[in-house]
Amino acid sequence: MTTAVTNPQNRPPLQGVRVLDLTRLLPGPMCTLHLADLGADVIKIEDLGAGDYASPPVREMLNRNKRGMRLDLKHPEGVQLLLKLCETADVLVEGFRPGVMARLGAGYDVVSARNPRLVYCSISGYGQTGPLSQKAGHDLNYCGYAGVADQVGTPAGELALSNLPMGDLLGGTMPAVMGILAALFDAQRTGQGRHVDVAIADGVLAHAVIPLAGLHSRGLVPEPGGDKLTGALPCYGLYPTQDGRYLAVGAFEHKFWDRFCTLLGRPDLAEHHIPKTQALNDWVRREVAHAVQAHPLAHWAQVLAGADCCVTPVLKLDEAQQLPHFQDRGMWVQVQTAQGQTMTQLAMPVQMSGYRFEVQRPAPLQGQHTRELLTAAGLDDTAIDVLCQRKVVG
């Protein structure tokens, strides 16, 4: 690990950890964003072509607090430069199909021979092994194979899509962060790194505990929209308001249901927290829906203000930005991008004593720090100029 002087009153927990980030799009860059926000020195390495072709807003949000360089790994000299960088790195994260890094000459065996303590994390759709390892896919495909897409639906039984990519983030990003930190902790004790194999499909499958519980308890997988978390009970669901917005009713406990029924003006429904028959269940749902739809969302927001009953408005993201609670928690930050624009971004979601999250630098332009990083690696200006001319780096 590298060392640096820091403010003892604001000590980043991953200060001194250097991460080489060869990933693109969402799961890998989000993983290394979390590491960067916790203080790691993350070096985003892109090719000299399209590089990370995520949309500009996504790129800006996922690559803050990182430095950037461009490197052609299809060029033998580019691979040698990467291996040189690995000698002083603590973590390497890659998101290519299994076997690509080995074919380039930078597989785990080669890298670990240069730096035995390095943690090498490979993020892929289906993992480094198994019959599907070479199969292409996206978030929806991984959720489909894992039996998770089947569980995202409406009470009418229709499957639905989510704009929060569960596979990429829950199955890819978070297991990668978990695996890297665990292996990094062990490497500091033993001096031996590990190859962390993260399969997005594995990750999302490993979190399907509620559907699996249903399979164990009832002998069958709940139908989409047919389990208690997806609309089977009137006390837990989304109800449209008069103006086409929604209330999120999460009154699982009887005491919360009682309060909600009172606020709804239907105290007679309180005794039907868990309706005894399907017909009664359907009737209670219709009655709740009718009562909620009689007023706009603003009315319900006022009625529910201060009421402890697990019923809340369903906000749009721009409204969540204005919510005093998230502002108080510091969940929104204003970032000046490298292009000179101001952008609202989400803050790091982990707060801890002795460290306050900060945006130290915006997302780098492609290759913005190439020369700086190569100079620190021991190359002089002449050598760097030659590499640039030969398009090994950029």
Image (tube, helix red, strand yellow):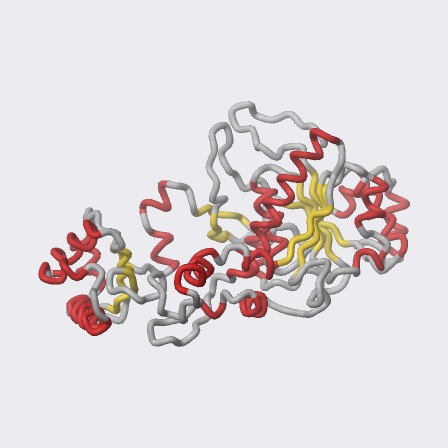
Task: From the viewer's side, name the closer residue of 253 and 124.
Answer: 253
Q: Position of residue 191 (x, y in %)?
A: 75, 32
Q: Residue at x 17, y 56 (%)?
A: 260
Residue 367 seen in render: no
Left or right of 280, for residue 343: right
Q: Position of residue 112 (x, y in %)?
A: 81, 43
Task: From the viewer's side, name the closer residue of 71 and 107.
Answer: 107
Q: Residue at x 68, y 59 (%)?
A: 127
Task: From the viewer's side, name the closer residue of 118 and 1.
Answer: 118
Left or right of 370, for residue 351: left
Position of the C terminus by quadrant: bottom right
Q: Position of residue 157 (x, y in %)?
A: 38, 75
Extreme residue in the top direction: 8
How many dots with numbers? 0
Task: From the viewer's side, name the closer residue of 288 and 332.
Answer: 288
Quarter of the figure with residue 50: bottom right
Considering only vertical position in the picture, is 183 above or below 150?
Answer: above
Q: Position of residue 14 (x, y in %)?
A: 61, 35
Position of the N terminus by quadrant: top right
Left or right of 187, for residue 260: left
Residue 316 seen in render: yes
